[in-house]
Image (cartoon, rainbow, N blue to C red):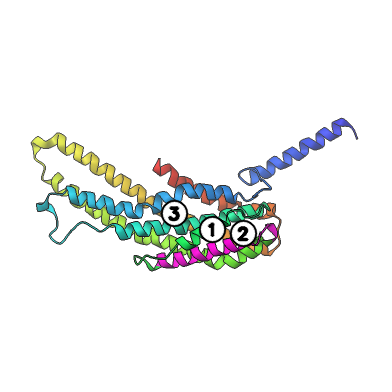
Amino acid sequence: MSVIWVRRRFIVEIVAAASLCAAMSGCVNLDDAAGLSKLADEARVALPKVSKDVSGTCARQNVLFADMPAAERPKIEQAQDCKPYQELADHLAKDQEALIAYFDALGKLSSNHPLGYDAVIDKNVTAGGTNSAFSASAVTAGNDAQHLLKSLADAATAGYREKQLGRLIDTNDAAVQSLTRSLKKVITADYVLLLSNEELSLDTFYQGPMASAQPNERLALILVQRQYANDTSALRLRKEDAVSYGKVMDDLAALHAKLKQETEKNASMVEVARQVAPVVESLRTALSDIQSRSN
């Protein structure tokens, strides 16, 4: 075998690998070929920016209320109790982290690495209660999240590896579908309603004083108008984040359904990665959109 022939064969292999990388929108690593762990890392950064604001919107409305002169406040209006919203935000943080941890675990299993964080999972199972009366979807999400974490704890204890990946996916598909629906509902319906209430609070706070401003208050009026524009723009971005959050949940549900379909075919991890690549790319775009709006 000539040296030239060996070199040509080596070059062909490199080109083939590069083509596969391009097709997957990033190099296929046999350790987690579908990039699920990397996706989980991105979700851990982006999603809390949305869920934490469930309590943030209540706090902002209370600031507006406190800054409004008593004579201008609606007679029946009073400051809100933000504790239930903070509890809901904490609840959502645990539930979405359970979902993220689950996809991270799938990435580790696909690379044939044993799950090595069972102690953390057990702790989170006991901490992820369903103490929230704000939304029925939040309670459903809590139950599904505990189901996922218990399943991961059992898998870690049993030393699951790649051969058990399909079993884990099949066992948890119903919980993943339900959890993603519930989290989407809390953010795109309940949280968006809170943002709509905040929008009304902004209009009440700004529009009356702007309408009654005197001609000699022109410069002060300009400053107030700019602040109003800034506040309404920030609110619009939060509503867009809620839409992106819902898209992430839809895509995670679709991704898991696709993983289930491919593992039932006993497809190789490279083939699985090829099939789910469009959904993974859509997920990364939605997560990136949330990140870009918060910068």
* 287 on left or right of 267: left
Q: Vertical placement of 100 versus 3: above or below?
A: below
Observer-nearest of 101 and 77: 101
Q: Are marks 1 and 3 in contact (CB under 8 Å)?
A: no
- The label shown at residue 87 is none
Q: CA distance from mark 1 to mark 3?
A: 24 Å
Say which residue label 2 marks: 156
Element at badge 3? helix
* 17 on left or right of 216: right
* 196 on left or right of 213: right
Element at badge 1? helix
Residue plotted at (62% across, 43% down): 26
Q: Is residue 146 magenta?
A: yes
- Quick one: which residue is furthest to the right in this view? 1
Say which residue label 1 marks: 121
Q: Are marks 1 and 2 in contact (CB under 8 Å)?
A: yes
Measured as percent of width and height from the top left, residue 173 is found at: 57, 65
Say which residue label 3 marks: 245
Can residue 246 be seen here?
A: no
